[in-house]
Structure formats: C-alpha cells, structure tokens
C-alpha cells in the first residue's frame, strides 16, 4: 500500500485541490484520520493546499474558459468543501468587475448568433436553454430575451 505522501502527491499533481477534496481522497484510501489531519496541516502551512487560492483559480477558470453563473460557481465550490463566505470574499476581492448582467448579454449574444445561423426558428429557445443550463436566473435570462431576441 502506497504511503500517504505518495498518494497525496499524485492527487495534487492533476490540479489544485481544496482541503476537503484532499481529506476525502485520503479517507477513501483508508489512511488514519490522525495521519490525514497532520498531513493537511503540513500541506496548508507549506501553501500546497490553500482554499482561498483554490477558489480564485476555480473562479478564474469558470469565468474565462468555462462560463457559469455566480450561483453555479458558488455551488460547485461549496460541493468541494469551501465555505460560502470565503467564496463570496474571493469574488468581491479578486473579481470586483464581474457583472452577471453583462455576462448574460455576452454569452447570450454569442449563442444567439450561432443559433440564428443554425436554425433561426429555434434560436430563442436554444439561447434560453443554454443560459439557464449555465445557472443564470430566470429573471436575468428573460430580461436578456426581451431585449435581444426578436
């Protein structure tokens, strides 16, 4: 059976992880709780596991490469064991210019242009479904639809 350091190194090599993810991974590997907690303290002190940094990287990735609503990003991060107040703090400090209304417009217009080329009759439904799947509220999506889809 591999030792705890070997296991965690492999796990952290793939991508940054939250403290919760590392803890759960090591529990599944059936390491002792005291060993897990000791290692987590060490990794945290060394800066190799940092929930704030993890949240910043995750949010940046979601906003730049894999767009999602703020609501959905918060849900993803809470599912990874981060506290909502930490996530909100990272959003407000690291992404102060984030404007969900503008994000809906930007993404909606891109999808609308593509949908009109593919099937003009279904364009409105396609854009609506796309924006809702990304986690944007009914209210924001409907406002976009009323303003942009004719």
Image (cartoon, helix red, strand yellow):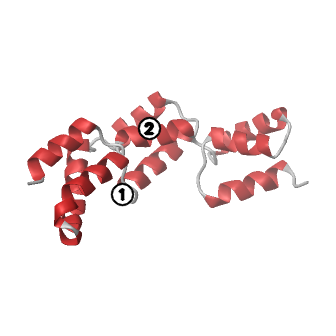
User: Toward the viewer: 75 or 90?
Assistant: 75
Residue 82's tag is: none
User: Toward the viewer: 38 or 81?
Assistant: 81
Quadrant hosting residue 12? bottom right
Horizontal arrangement in the rendering, residue 35 relative to residue 115 (left or right): right
Where disc 2 sits, the SS reads helix
| Rendered position, 10 above or below 77 | below
Of badges 2 and 1, the one in the foreground is 2
Q: Position of residue 149 (x, y in %)?
A: 12, 53
Residue 64's tag is: 1
Quadrant hosting residue 38? top right
Q: Position of residue 82 (x, y in %)?
A: 54, 35
Residue sitting at the far right: 1
Within 10 Å of the Cα at label 2, are there few (<14), some (14-19), or many (20+) other Cα atoms? many
Identify the residue shown where x is 41% and y is 33%.
Answer: 89
Where disc 1 sits, the SS reads helix
Q: In which quadrant will I find the N terminus? A: bottom right
Q: Position of residue 147 (x, y in %)?
A: 9, 47
Identify the residue shown where x is 63% and y is 60%.
Answer: 14
Disc 2 marks which residue? Answer: 74
Identify the residue shown where x is 62% and y is 45%.
Answer: 47
Q: In which quadrant will I find the C terminus? A: bottom left
Identify the residue shown where x is 71% and y is 39%.
Answer: 23
| Rendered position, 48 above or below 24 | below
Determine if residue 109 is in view: no
User: Toward the viewer: 124 or 27?
Assistant: 124
Horizontal arrangement in the rendering, residue 148 relative to residue 10 (left or right): left
Determine if residue 30 is in view: yes
Horizontal arrangement in the rendering, residue 72 relative to residue 113 (left or right): right
């Amino acid at each position: 059976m591999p030792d705890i350091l070997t296991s965690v190194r492999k796990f952290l090599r793939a991508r940054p992880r939250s403290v919760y993810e590392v803890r759960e991974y090591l529990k599944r590997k059936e390491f002792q709780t005291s060993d897990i907690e000791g290692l987590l303290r060490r990794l945290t002190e060394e800066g190799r596991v940092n929930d704030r940094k993890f949240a910043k990287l995750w949010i940046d990735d979601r906003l730049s490469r894999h767009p999602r609503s703020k609501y959905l990003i918060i849900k993803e991060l809470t599912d990874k064991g981060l506290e909502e107040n930490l996530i909100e703090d990272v959003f407000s400090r690291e992404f102060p210019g984030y404007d969900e209304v503008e994000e809906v417009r930007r993404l909606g217009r891109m999808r609308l242009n593509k949908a009109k080329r593919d099937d003009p009759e279904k364009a409105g439904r396609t854009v609506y479904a796309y924006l809702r799947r990304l986690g944007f509220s009914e209210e924001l999506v409907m406002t976009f639809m009323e303003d942009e889809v004719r």
